[in-house]
Image (tube, rainbow, N blue to C red):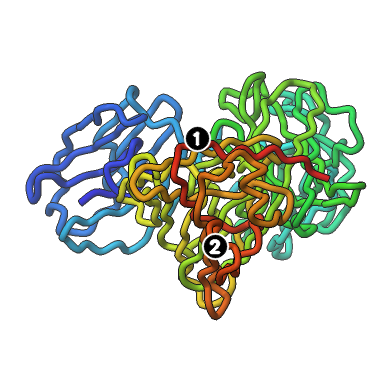
């Protein structure tokens, strides 16, 4: 069994854990970075062994990892450390163990330090507490200051604030005093803020208490351009299904969330758009907290990963996105996209469905085998790409209709290879702007007369299977054309390339 930090369920590429292996006598600290061979550091089992309750802690910092038991450090490491986000993980292999409580905390760049003075008889009549520096993530308009304090008779409490554009500037910034809770903050707009409280008493039996403090602020909207000197400024455009106003929006740089806000979608002919500023890396801090030239920025609205674009300092970039919605019913659905997803990995393409599906199948005609993607983390998927050329089956587990939102670019040209291997069946997508009638749709897009049958499956209809037989056009053909959003089985008698050349309004 093991417990600590890991970026997967078991045997993940990155971890930092306590582990009992082999049980019941051996005990170790383990860590791994980027799937390299893991490092094992021996630990002596605590008094009473692992069957007696103990408090275990890991401290993970840039360049340092430490393991603690009951407050005492038992191991450390300075190389081979994970450097990507991880989650708390508790793993018991055919064992059971009890967890009384768990606490996770993001370490501050500068942790509070307490220095004990010499013994003093009597009481201190006054003192100050200066907070750590707080980063709001961007230049902020301050609103108001609220605090909760207990001030018995004979005691007093004051509070003041200082702000600066960077952390280092706080040291020389001017303090502004606030005499009571609820006052409007008059400090200059800035990214960094710090508070200091003064406490006094003239009674040795009582003391004032500052119980909580809340700083209200809004990040300044960067609209209209020009952009900040060290920021990436983008407009994300939608031509269908724009997100609701107030939907969470995030920008990610190299796997790190560097900007979070809510959308303010505006109508603009012919598209909807939202403007978003992604900050650059602050050279005044040791950690990376923004983009640098060449980084890839990924935009995420709600649960949808929308698009990527390169980060360049001081640029104004428009990211054109197109959203498409596919309505899915409980059971098996045969679908495809009419656009090119920004990220084609199945987990990303299908992320808007959450846990409402469990299996996805696509057919590899050339290899005559099924490709699979599922929601089981411990299995290896053979389906690694879902794009506009892919027709696929997806099994929906939700009891009611769900909507798959896909966002990406509109492909003006797509080639889909059709194979006559085996029985000649191919499962394909239909990346077009609208419905096109059969038989012209295939003939006009490169297949000619080498196909015989086309099948579609519409789960919501009483008779879900629809068919078109080119060799018997007067027969029971109930599939009259191809429509975006549906996947299609196409049978060919020779190797063909289905070529879509699409113009969009």
Q: Measured along the vertical axis of the image, is residue 13 above or below residue 379?
A: above
Q: Residue at x 36, y 30 (%)?
A: 34
In the image, 292 versus 90, the foreground residue is 292
Q: Pointer 1: what residue?
A: 115
Query: Horizontal and vertical percent for residue 356?
Result: 49, 66
Q: Residue at x 65, y 21 (%)?
A: 292
Q: Residue at x 38, y 28 (%)?
A: 64
Disc 1 vs disc 2: Cβ atoms closer than 8 Å? no
Query: Horizontal and vertical percent for residue 322?
Result: 73, 46
Tag of residue 43: none
In the image, 211 versus 298, the foreground residue is 298
Neighbor class of circle 2 (other Cα within 10 Å; few <14, some 14-19, many 20+) is few
Q: Residue at x 48, y 41 (%)?
A: 418
Q: Is residue 83 visible from the viewing direction of this image?
A: yes
Q: Pointer 2: what residue?
A: 472
In the image, 234 versus 192, the foreground residue is 234
* SS assignment at label 2: loop
Position of the C terminus, as image quadrant, is top right
Q: Measured along the vertical axis of the image, is residue 96 above or below residue 84?
A: below
Q: Measured along the vertical axis of the image, is residue 85 above or below residue 453?
A: above
């Amino acid at each position: 069994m093991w417990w600590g930090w890991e970026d997967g369920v078991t045997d993940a590429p990155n971890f930092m854990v306590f582990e009992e292996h082999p049980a019941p006598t051996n005990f170790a600290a383990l860590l791994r970075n980027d799937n390299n061979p893991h490092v094992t550091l021996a630990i002596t089992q605590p008094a009473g062994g692992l069957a007696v309750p103990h408090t275990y802690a890991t401290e993970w910092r840039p360049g340092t990892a430490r393991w603690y038991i009951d407050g005492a450090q038992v191991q450390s490491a300075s190389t081979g450390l994970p450097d990507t986000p991880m989650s708390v993980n508790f793993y018991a292999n055919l064992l059971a163990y009890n967890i009384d409580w768990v606490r996770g905390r993001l370490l501050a760049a500068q942790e509070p330090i307490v220095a004990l003075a010499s013994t003093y008889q009597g009481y201190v009549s006054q003192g100050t507490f200066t907070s750590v520096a707080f980063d709001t993530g961007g230049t902020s308009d301050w609103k108001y200051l609220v605090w909760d304090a207990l001030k018995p008779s004979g005691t007093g409490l004051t509070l003041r604030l200082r702000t600066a554009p960077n952390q280092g500037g706080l040291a020389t910034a001017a303090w502004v005093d606030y005499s009571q809770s609820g006052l409007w903050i008059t400090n200059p707009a800035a990214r960094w803020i710090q508070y200091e409280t003064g406490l006094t008493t003239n009674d040795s039996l009582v003391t004032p208490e500052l119980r909580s403090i809340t700083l209200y602020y809004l990040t300044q909207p960067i609209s209209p351009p020009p952009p900040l000197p060290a920021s990436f400024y983008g407009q994300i455009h939608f031509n269908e299904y724009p997100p609701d106003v107030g939907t969470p929006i995030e920008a990610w740089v190299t796997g790190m969330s560097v900007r979070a806000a809510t959308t303010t979608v505006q109508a603009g002919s012919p598209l909807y758009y939202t403007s978003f500023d992604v900050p650059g890396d602050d050279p005044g801090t040791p950690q990376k907290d923004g983009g640098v030239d060449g980084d890839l920025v990924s935009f995420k609205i709600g649960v949808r990963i929308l698009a990527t674009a390169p980060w360049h300092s001081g640029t104004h970039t428009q990211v054109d996105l197109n959203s498409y919605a596919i309505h899915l019913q409980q059971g098996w659905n045969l679908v495809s996209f009419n656009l090119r997803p920004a990220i084609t990995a199945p987990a990303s393409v299908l992320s808007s469905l959450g846990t409402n599906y469990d299996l996805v199948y696509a057919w590899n005609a050339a290899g005559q085998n099924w490709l699979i993607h599922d929601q089981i983390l411990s299995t290896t998927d053979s389906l690694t790409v879902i794009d506009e050329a892919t027709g696929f089956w997806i099994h929906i587990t939700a009891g009611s209709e769900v909507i798959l939102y896909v966002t990406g670019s509109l492909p003006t040209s797509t080639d889909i290879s059709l194979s006559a291997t085996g029985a000649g069946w191919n499962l394909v997508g239909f990346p077009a702007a609208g419905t096109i009638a059969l038989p012209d749709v295939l003939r006009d897009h490169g297949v000619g007369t080498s196909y015989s049958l086309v099948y579609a499956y519409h789960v919501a209809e009483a008779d879900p299977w629809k068919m078109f037989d080119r060799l018997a056009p007067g027969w029971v053909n109930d599939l009259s054309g191809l429509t975006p959003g549906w996947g299609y089985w196409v049978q060919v008698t020779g190797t063909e390339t289905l070529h879509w050349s699409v113009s969009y309004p």
